[in-house]
Amino acid sequence: MEVNEKCDVYSFGIVTLEVIMGEHPRDLTMSKLSVEELRTHVVLDQRLNVPMGQVAEVVNQIVELAFACLNINPRSRPLMLHVSKKLSTIIPSVTRQLKKQESTSSCQKQ
């Protein structure tokens, strides 16, 4: 096995799924299932509230990105630069939404 940037990308995919699932996704990464089949096996950490609305969409986009990083063929994995750029477009949208929700709920409390 050649150690290169694509190994970092793979590791990012593993860590991302581990955070979302609350456990190491070892069964998923060792299986021979297709990426589409694997997606049905991703279960959110039961200690977390179920995401709703735009947050759920963001979680789905991050899971999709994680699976792209886990592509069996290292050449087919995105560059970490592309992963970073994708995250920089996903995260601000949910941050804006959460700030909007916080300001709405604080206005309602007053």
Image (spheres, helix red, strand yellow):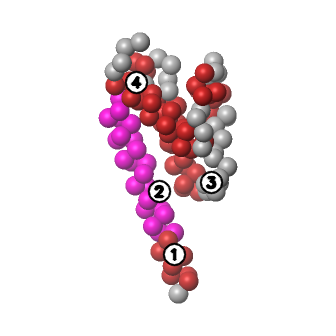
- Neighbour tally class for label 4: few under 14, some 14-19, many 20 plus, Cα within 10 Å: some
Q: Is residue 49 visible?
A: yes
Judged by depth in the image, the label closer to the viewer, 1 or 4, is: 4
User: Pointer 2 and pointer 4: residues touching (CB < 8 Å)?
Assistant: no
* Residue at the spot of label 4: 7
Task: Looking at the picture, tell me which residue is in the foreground, 59 or 26.
Answer: 26
- Neighbour tally class for label 3: few under 14, some 14-19, many 20 plus, Cα within 10 Å: few
* Residue at the spot of label 1: 104
In primary-sequence order, the first of circles 1 and 3 is 3
Q: Secondary structure at mark 1?
A: helix
In primary-sequence order, the first of circles 2 and 1 is 2
User: Pointer 2 and pointer 1: residues touching (CB < 8 Å)?
Assistant: no
Judged by depth in the image, the label closer to the viewer, 2 or 4, is: 4
- Neighbour tally class for label 2: few under 14, some 14-19, many 20 plus, Cα within 10 Å: some
* Residue at the spot of label 3: 48
Image side of residue 55 versus residue 93, left or right: right
In the depicted structure, whether residue 94 falls above or below residue 16: below
Q: Secondary structure at mark 2?
A: helix
User: Pointer 2 and pointer 3: residues touching (CB < 8 Å)?
Assistant: no
In the depicted structure, whether residue 90 falls above or below residue 76: below
Q: Given the image, on which type of amino acid does mark 3 rest?
A: Leu
Judged by depth in the image, the label closer to the viewer, 1 or 3, is: 3
Task: Looking at the picture, tell me which residue is in the foreground, 32 or 22.
Answer: 22
Q: CA distance from mark 1 to mark 4?
A: 43 Å
Which stretch did the figure color magenta? 78-101
Whether 87 is among the magenta residues is: yes
* Number of the label disc, if any, that sits on residue 94: 2
Where residue 40 sits, quadrant-wise, is top right
In primary-sequence order, the first of circles 3 and 4 is 4
Q: CA distance from mark 2 to mark 4?
A: 28 Å
Where residue 51 sits, quadrant-wise, is bottom right
Q: Given the image, on which type of amino acid does mark 2 rest?
A: Val
